[in-house]
Image: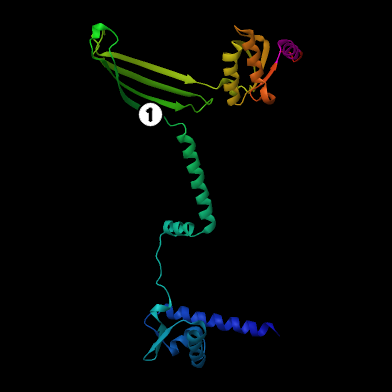
Amino acid sequence: MEDEPRSGKRDRLARMMRVVTLLQAHPDGMAIEEIARRVDMSRRTVYRDLKAIEGEIGIPLWSEEGRWGVASEGFLPPLKLTLDEAVRRAVENNPDLAIVRLGTEVEAARVGESRGAFAPVFSTTLGHSSNATPATNLLLGDRGVDVNDSFWSTGVRQRLPFGGGTWSASWDSARTTTDNPLSSFDPSLQAGFQVAVSQPLLKDRGIETLLVCGVTTEVCVNTTVREANDRGFRCIVLADCCASYIPEFHDVGLKMIKAQGGIFGSVSTSAPVIAALSASGV
């Protein structure tokens, strides 16, 4: 029993939509008798449905000289699109596809940024300096000597896409002028070309611990340990494989390395290291 009213409402709504569709197909309007005949209803029912279309559904209608039609402001005009235009508009107005497209653009930007890290970088440096010094001998008289230096450097460097290395090339030039009468060349010209390739071999091979030895303990060994520590290596200094011209400096250099719990590295001797390497088959 409950389905009958619902079914009647659905039938009534479907009937009214049939009338609206019929009126849309006839922009010049239709007479009541013609509408009733096309939808197989009585004139009274057609009148009642026309009133309901305006009052309940809210679709504006017009009536003139017995003809009824849908007002032009009731519906948007038909939009004529090609298949490509329809697909493009559907894609542009789909939130899910917009998120996917935005994600693709972000990834493309990241790829472009990564590729930019390997782009060659050009650099140019220009400089000029002047130096005036008082006379140092009788040949120069009582006036000073003026020296003017002009220098410039241009080059290119690029990170290699493999191995983590870098290559660079540079051209350096300098020109020096002086009013020193004792100078053999005026002006003096210098030029040089340099090509360099750097490669972090130790890191690429998975080496994390370095055994350091050499001379002198307080200078070369200490400097090597500090720079290696800054680059993330663990350093072990072999005390009996290092030396200094002054024994006291050797002892102080080792104490500096292992100070404060071994900030820069640790100190050992060669015997336990050789034993450990022999046990591992090295």
User: What scheme was used to colour the molecule?
Assistant: rainbow
Q: Quadrant of the C terminus?
A: top right
Helix, strand or loop for disc 1: strand
Residue type marked 1 = Phe
Query: 8 and 143: which one is in front?
Result: 143
Q: Residue at the location (60% across, 83% down)?
A: 9
Rate crowding at label 1 as few (under 14), some (14 to 19) or many (20 or more) other CA atoms within 10 Å: few
**Dominant secondary structure, magenta:** helix
Q: Quadrant of residue 137?
A: top left
Label 1, on which residue?
122
Location of residue 35 with respect to 122 vertically, above or below: below
Q: Quadrant of residue 182?
A: top left
Q: Is residue 138 left or right of residue 95?
A: left
Specify the quadrant of the image occupied by residue 89: bottom left
Is 275 contained in the magenta span?
Answer: yes
The residue sitting at the bottom extreme is 44
Residue 29 in the image, given as x and y percentages of width and height: 39, 84
Q: How many numbered marks have been drawn onto this rendered protein structure?
A: 1
Q: Which residues are magenta?
A: 268-278
Residue under the image location 43 percent in, 75 percent down: 75
Above or below — where is 282 with respect to 33? Answer: above
Q: Residue 103: give x, y in percent of width and height.
A: 52, 49
83 w.r.t. 143: above or below: below
Horizontal arrangement in the rendering, residue 114 relative to residue 225 (left or right): left
- Measured from the top left, where is residue 108 in percent x and y? 49, 43
Q: Quadrant of the N terminus?
A: bottom right
Q: Position of residue 118 (x, y in %)?
A: 46, 31
Residue 178 against residue 112 in the figure, above or below: above
Q: Is residue 173 magenta?
A: no
The residue nearer to you, when weighing 227 against 49, is: 227
Residue placed most toward the observer, 267 or 204? 267
